[in-house]
Amino acid sequence: MPAERTVQISGSTVIVRPNAEAASRVAADSIAEIVESAVKARGKAVLGLATGATPEVVYANLAARHRAGGLSFQKVVTYNLDEYYPIQPIDPLSYRSYMHRHLFSRVDLPANQAHVLDGTVPEAFVREHTAEFDRWIEADGGLDLQLLGIGRNGHIGFNEPAEWSVAEAVAAPTRLVELHPVTRADAVREFGDAAKVIPRALTMGVKQILSARAIVMLATGPRKASIVAQALRGPVTTAVPASLLQTVADRVVWILDEPAAAELGS
Ligand code: GLP
């Protein structure tokens, strides 16, 4: 199979590149394009952003474009997918810190246009906070683009595999969730010790994710090959949250490196 290819699978466009670097460049290209076209069309671009190891190269790429003078974030508004709960924003393990390190401090995005769910909200006010987050996105006219990564268990944001119906899952709002054992095991990488992993998080709901006008899913590396194949080729099931993307397939572009595409078949 050619190392560079674009195919249609279950109604979505799937772009495969030989390595993570090249795949990340395609993702950065689509983000830059959407920022430019949305700013031109309606004066601003609203981006949903992801964390994790996968998008780090994408953010480095966007920051480089900004430094080179071609890409401005002055008219960009961002909403991050998720945040641990509870956590202080200043904690180096918070997704607020991650975003600061990888993107916010490196581009001209006005601070008051960057939204990350607040891991310090007292529990009694969490519902109010998450409902407000969804209202902000709506008031901003919805997401022009949602960037996603995929967990090894198929999670998107921190929407974890769960025993509920597809109808319930696709209507799920932004909310407080318990992390799945696979997610907690993978988070040991960041937290250094299983006992230190924060077991709960705030996550954007599947409803907001699926409402984005464009969805870019980036997955790289051999550890993602099996779940990518299940999400793209398998049934739409809440056991694999990323398979819910099939319900809005024509708005979804999967960008994969060759190792992550290895189990897709031809
Ligand atoms: C993390 C994030 C997700 C991310 C996923 C994959 O826990 N909450 O938004 O997409 O898990 O992470 P990685 O890119 O490090 O594999």
Image (cartoon, grey):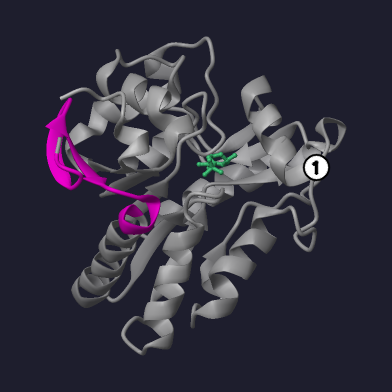
Q: Is residue 245 left or right of residue 183?
A: left
Most extreme residue toward the right is 195
Q: How many numbered marks does the figure carry?
A: 1
Tell me if residue 182 comes above or below residue 126 in the rendering.
Answer: above
- The image shows residue 60 at horizontal and vertical percentages of 47, 69
In the image, what residue type sits under mark 1?
Answer: Gly
Question: For the point 54% across and 15% down, which residue is it?
Answer: 162
Looking at the picture, tell me which residue is in the foreground, 94 or 119.
94
Most extreme residue toward the bottom is 69
Looking at the picture, tell me which residue is in the foreground, 38 or 193.
193
Q: Quadrant of ligand 1?
A: top right
Q: Is residue 263 left or right of residue 106?
A: left
Residue 143 visible in the shown view: no
- According to the picture, the residue beneath numbered tag 1 turns out to be 192
Figure quadrant of the C terminus: top left
Which image quarter: residue 144?
bottom left
> Magenta segment range?
2-23
Which structural element holds mark 1? loop
- The image shows residue 84 at horizontal and vertical percentages of 70, 43
- The image shows residue 16 at horizontal and vertical percentages of 24, 44
Tell me if residue 109 comes above or below residue 145 in the rendering.
Answer: below
Q: Is residue 123 magenta?
A: no
Looking at the picture, tell me which residue is in the foreground, 138 or 195.
195
Figure quadrant of the N terminus: top left
Question: For the point 15% across and 44% down, which residue is it?
Answer: 5
Looking at the picture, tell me which residue is in the foreground, 205 or 96.
96
Question: For the point 50% across and 29% down, which residue is it?
Answer: 155
Which image quarter: residue 169?
top left
Q: Is residue 241 left or right of residue 180?
A: left
Residue 249 visible in the shown view: yes
